[in-house]
Image (cartoon, rainbow, N blue to C red):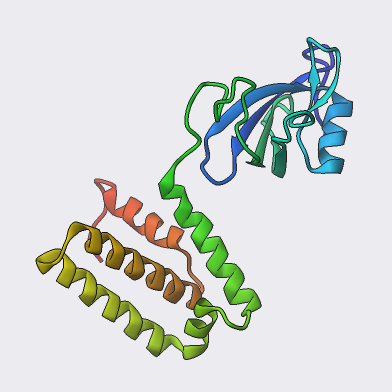
Amino acid sequence: MELDFEKMNGLIPAIIQDNSTQKVLMLGFMNQEAYQKTVETGKVTFFSRTKNRLWTKGEESGNFLHVVSIKADCDNDTLLIMVNPVGPVCHTGTDTCWGDKNEQDIMFLKELQDFIDKRYEEMPEGSYTTSLFKSGVNKMAQKVGEEAVETVIEACNGTDERLIYEGSDLLYHLIVLLTSKGYRIEDLARELKERHSPSWKKH
């Protein structure tokens, strides 16, 4: 990756974003040495303008930023670094440097999908998800149907708590079925997004 460190006298901004929640956590600056150390160690390292030295985030607190991916912008003078953070990011103790909570429950669906993908690839013994995959498509589809019926029953005659419980079961088993067919939950999201367009017409 060819980066332009000259525009800001040897520094480039690095935007740090949580890989799971997609929350922007902080902004720091890197010189070439900090960038290289980040790549080599897998932990985000900045150049501290106040301390005038390299500074690995978490070197004192233990709240490291573990690198998932690094991308440069179109001008090669700004970085977007996706991370898995350990603990709060800001020195004040908050999750982000803007005081936001680093939470976004909807993004857990992607994490769950990734987990189920891994189960499908590795098929570990003793895993319920593995047993579903091994049962075959017909059994998996039947399980989705059973969970759908249970969700309907709770919606009509049950409690809100049980509705959420059964609905969660339904969604989990649907993701398993999708995975077995080579799809992901994002494929459903993409379809729903297309349907939301004013130009969409029913097939």
Q: Left of 51 or right of it: where is 71? A: left
- The outermost residue toward the left is 157
Vertical side of 108 occupied by 38: above or below: above
- Looking at the rendered image, the quarter that the C terminus falls into is bottom left
In the displayed structure, does residue 160 sit left or right of residue 68? Answer: left
Number of on-image labels: 0
Picture residue at 48% right of the left edge, 27% below the top: 100
Image quadrant in which the N terminus is located:
top right
Residue found 47% across the figure and 32% down from its top: 101
Where's residue 52, x and y in %? 85, 12
Q: Nearer the viewer, residue 10 or 114?
A: 114
Q: Quadrant of residue 109?
A: bottom left
Q: In the image, 91: left or right of 33?
A: left
Residue pictured at 65% horizontal, 40% vertical: 86
In front of the other: 175 or 63: 63
Q: Residue at x 78, y 14 (%)?
A: 7
Residue 170 in percent (x, y) is at: 32, 70
Task: Give residue 167's quadrant in the image.
Answer: bottom left
Residue 103, image x, y percentages: 47, 39
The correct choice, above or below, for 133 with respect to 184 in the image is below
Residue 65 quadrant: top right
Residue 155 horizontal/vertical position (percent): 15, 64
Q: In the depicted view, which residue is nearer to us: 113 or 10?
A: 113
